Amino acid sequence: MRRPRPEEVASFYQGYVAAVGDEDVLATLEKSVAQTRALLAPLDERRARHRYAPGKWSVKEVVGHVIDGERVFAYRALRMARGDATPLAAFDQDAYVARGGADQRALGDLLDELGHLRAANLCFFRGLSAEEWERRGTANDCSFLVCAFPWILAGHELHHRQVLVERYLEGP
């Protein structure tokens, strides 16, 4: 699968696409969940509720946000791949996290959910035809090609894993 060109993905997401290496993006998606799990699984529940500053998300909320992103981006890819031209709305990540209840769930359950979602999304992506990968749609008033979504998912997870390492796992 080809890397999307800058004009095929909203500017906000271009950093995510750029962060992904040149390896097969589906192979990257397959490996990255295991990397996130390996990073976070050793945390106890107290550490998983850690926030590096007041008003910032906890570790578990970051995982919940990655899960929400996985669902939203895969849904967008599905709609566009199926030729649905209906413009799709934005999602308010802060409102989703605030209502998501991640801090009330076990970290292991959140990581399991992310793994299951990723496995399902990989099945979906692997089943798309060349024509479906090139279909275009609109989300959040921005134009996307379906082929952009695996790259966005991979870069989004990588971004948040780096934030977790730099800001959450260095603290108390």
Image (cartoon, rainbow, N blue to C red):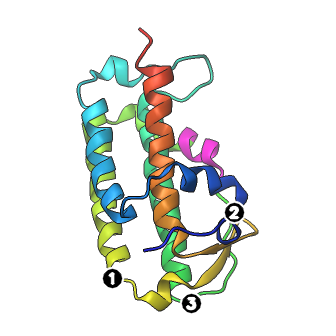
Residue 78 drawn at (x, y percent): 48, 78
Residue 41 drawn at (x, y percent): 25, 31
Q: Compute the Cα span from label 3 to label 2.
A: 19 Å
Q: Which residue is mark 2?
A: 10
Which portion, as a residue range, is magenta? 92-98
Choose between 16 and 68: the one closer to the eye: 16
Q: Secondary structure at mark 1?
A: loop
Q: Nearer the viewer, mark 1 or mark 3?
A: 1
User: Please, what is the three-letter code of the amino acid marked with disc 1?
Assistant: Gly
User: Please, what is the three-letter code of the amino acid marked with disc 2?
Assistant: Ala
In the displayed structure, does residue 146 sit left or right of residue 64? right
| Residue occupying the point 30% across, 34% down | 107
Picture quarter with the N terminus: bottom left
Asked if 31 appears above or below 46 in the picture, the reply is: below
Choose between 78 and 109: the one closer to the eye: 78
Residue 155 drawn at (x, y percent): 50, 51
Choose between 21 and 26: the one closer to the eye: 21
Magenta segment, prevailing SS (helix, strand or loop): helix
Kindly check if marks 3 and 2 are in contact, taking CB atoms under 8 A apart as contact. Answer: no
Q: Secondary structure at mark 2?
A: loop
Asked if 123 appears above or below 96 in the picture, the reply is: below
Kindly check if marks 1 and 2 are in contact, taking CB atoms under 8 A apart as contact. Answer: no
Instruction: Based on the picture, tell me whether residue 169 belongs to the magenta stretch.
Output: no
Query: Which of the 4 image quarters holds residue 59?
Result: top left
Extreme-right residue of the structure: 141
Asked if 63 appears above or below 172 in the picture, the reply is: below
Q: Which residue is mark 1?
A: 127
Counting the numbered discs, the total is: 3
Q: Which residue is mark 3?
A: 83
| Residue occupying the point 39% across, 62% down | 25
| Residue occupying the point 34% across, 36% down | 105
